[in-house]
Amino acid sequence: MSRRKIVVHNHNPESVFLVGLEIRTPSRDPSLPPAESLAELSRLAETAGLRVAGSDAQKLSNPHPATYVGPGKAEAIREQIRDLAVETVIFDGELAPGQQRNLEQLFGESVKVLDRSALILDIFAQHAHTREGQLQVELAQYEYRLPRLTRLWTHLVRQAGGRAGGMAGGVGLRGPGETQLESDRRQIRQRITLLKQELEKVRRHRDAAYRYRRRRGIRTAALVGYTNAGKSSLLNALSRAGEGRAVETADQLFATLDPTTRRIRLPRGTQILVTDTVGFINKLPVDLIAAFRATLEGIARADLLLQVVDVTSVCTEAHIRTVEQVLKGLGAGNIPRLLVWNKIDLLPHPPDSESKAAAEGTRVEVSAKNGRNLPLLLKAMEEILKGGLVPIEVLIPYGDDRLKNLIFEQGMVEWFRCGPEGTRIRAHVPPSLASRTSSASQASPTGQAENRTP
């Protein structure tokens, strides 16, 4: 089966022309202003290794049903791409299969017509390094291509001679063409079924790991946010990842695709698992979200979400709204969340490490690059996670080191003191561990605390 795809040349990048559409309907509330959305599309093209030769935009009440932009604007775009010798036109929205086919006929067979979803899928395909990531991207690509498969067979019309290449179609063309098309559709559906089965195995494996962590009382946090907000850099800084363990980072969109989990220690000694997830973006393809559901389910099961925001962006509020919409769709809208405003090292006047502006409520301003205010972030994470724990004060007899170690590993210890009968500990622990400690020792009332001891 013939496939049309973006071809990246290292020394001679493919030239592209970008087209934006501003919807003038008052009821619409786009996540990003049209100009910013088109600028983001330009960054996506550069991430894919393309060269942006020009761009154009139009205001309409609704996308044109035949050509997305108005027919007159489509004609004007055709003249521009001819003058610029452009090889590809990318629209800042999702094109219906009919719109894409009509635009290809208008622009000519030498020009590829793509939409924002196809470009994002191509970037994901470039950045998927693990087997799981490759399966997810392949599934999303097939789901996207299946309804657009018809246009790939228009070359059969041009290959036939005489009347077969004209309006009448021609004897012998229609039947074989449809047969081959249906064969390709069947193969794609079979491949989609196989990929979904493979990803279901991944989902079951993640579910087993999740249940194991719950039994052990291991707390988890997930880094979420708009792409290029600095999530991977923040994970490296929090886990103090050295050479060989650091998550790959780059100043580009979707630099990191495959999720990575690291163990970090909070100020009171509690260890938690923090997972770096794929970045979100405006107009994220629905097929991509569905394909990555096995990975993104971990977000909905986290005890805490660290929503990383690029403080230097001019569209921070729009980025926050976009992330919140995706989280709500994943069923993670009610999980405790901490806004982490990253990259304060790029501000002309970054806040002091102990100022109220640096950490207030559910917001912390940090720099993953130089480590500024990371202790404040860890402290804020600890306070939020404490909300799901149970306060206890117990006497652990000598010899029961396993229970004592579990309290220190899974809980947040306020103080402990060694006495003649054992170790008295005041801490906040998971409910499952609290029930175990109640049978091991009769707890003193938490309101009658001894002197606090480090």
Image (cartoon, rainbow, N blue to C red):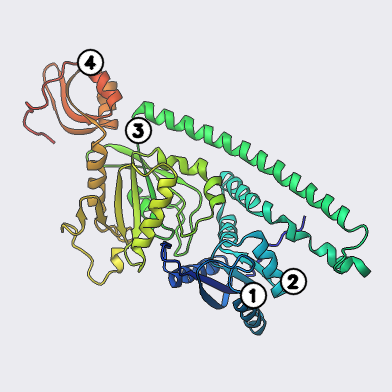
What whole-number distance in Å separates the C-alpha atoms at marks 3 and 4?
Answer: 21 Å
Q: Is disc 3 placed on a helix, strand or loop?
A: loop
Which residue type carries mark 2?
Glu
Task: Give the label, 3 or 2, closer to the camera.
Answer: 2
The spot of residue 250 in percent (x, y) is 46, 62
- Measured along the vertical axis of the image, is residue 83 above or below residue 271? below
Residue 12 is marked as: 1
What residue appears at the point 60 percent right and 48 percent down from the top-left corner?
A: 134
Q: Nearer the viewer, residue 423 or 348?
A: 348
Q: Earlier in the sequence, mark 1 or mark 3?
A: 1
What residue appears at the point 36 percent right and 67 percent down from the top-left corner?
A: 313
- Measured along the vertical axis of the image, is residue 451 above or below residue 104? above
Residue under label 2 = 109
152 vs 299, left or right, is right
The spot of residue 14 in percent (x, y) is 63, 72
Residue 401 visible in the snapshot: no
Mark 4 closeness class: few <14, some 14–19, many ≥20 residues within 10 Å: some
The spot of residue 73 in percent (x, y) is 59, 78
What whole-number distance in Å separates the C-alpha atoms at marks 1 and 3?
Answer: 50 Å
Residue under label 4 = 440
